[in-house]
Image (cartoon, grey):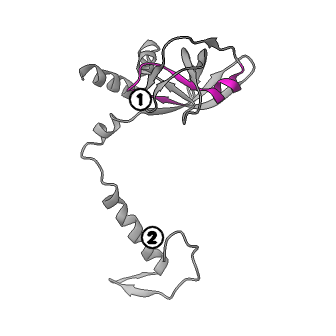
Amino acid sequence: MPLDEPAKKEVSHEFREGFRHTELCERLTGANQTVPATNPRKRDDQEGLLKCDFIYDILLVTFDKQLRRRMVVDFETEANFMDHDVFERMNVRMDPYDGPPTQLTTRGELTPLGKVQATWTIVGYETPYCAEFYVVRGTSFDVILGTASCRAIDLSSVDPMVATRLDDLKQT
């Protein structure tokens, strides 16, 4: 019986290796035991973490409101990006962009619609940060912060793992 089917009336208990289990309990236990086999842990979890982007909940500050969004810290790109939908909700002015396409690791070359200054705080912290973002359309993220801004705003003072990642980039 697949796990996604609703549980039916409990079946009678039977002895399995000295323990009493219902059929549902047996299926769930078996499913839990297969998770490590299908998703083996890395030898060094720290090493795996050092290859991931970081995600923070942020509050974008505007004149009349705060917008809660997700910010991805991308350690493979230098520039900052903001989705056009987020920009529209901020209701701020966008400066024109007439430069060449920019590079975003996950999307390749993008031609920004413009640039915008944004101020934000990380949820749970009081320190405001400010940076310039390229506004782009049709993305799967709200805001991306690149490595140049991570260094400029000293994000590593909030999250020491950011410092570890930035130091790791210098060594490669």
Res 105 label: 1
Q: State the residue in front, 71 or 114.
A: 114
Please name the amino acid that badge 2 sits on.
Answer: Leu
Can residue 150 be seen in this snapshot?
A: yes
Residue in the image at 47% along x and 87% along y: 13
Magenta residues span 71-91
Q: Which quadrant would residue 118 be assigned to in this image? A: top right
Q: Position of residue 119 (x, y in %)?
A: 60, 17
Residue in the image at 57% along x and 12% along y: 97
Element on which disc 2 rests: helix
Decide: is 82 above or below 42: above
Q: Position of residue 165 (x, y in %)?
A: 34, 26
Q: State the residue in front, 49 or 74.
A: 74
Q: Earlier in the sequence, mark 2 or mark 1?
A: 2
The crowd level at tag 1 (other Cα within 10 Å; few <14, some 14-19, many 20+) is few
Residue in the image at 52% along x and 86% along y: 11
Q: State the residue in front, 118 or 106.
A: 106
Verify whether residue 37 appears in magenta: no
The C terminus sits in image quarter: top left
What residue would you read off at disc 2? 28
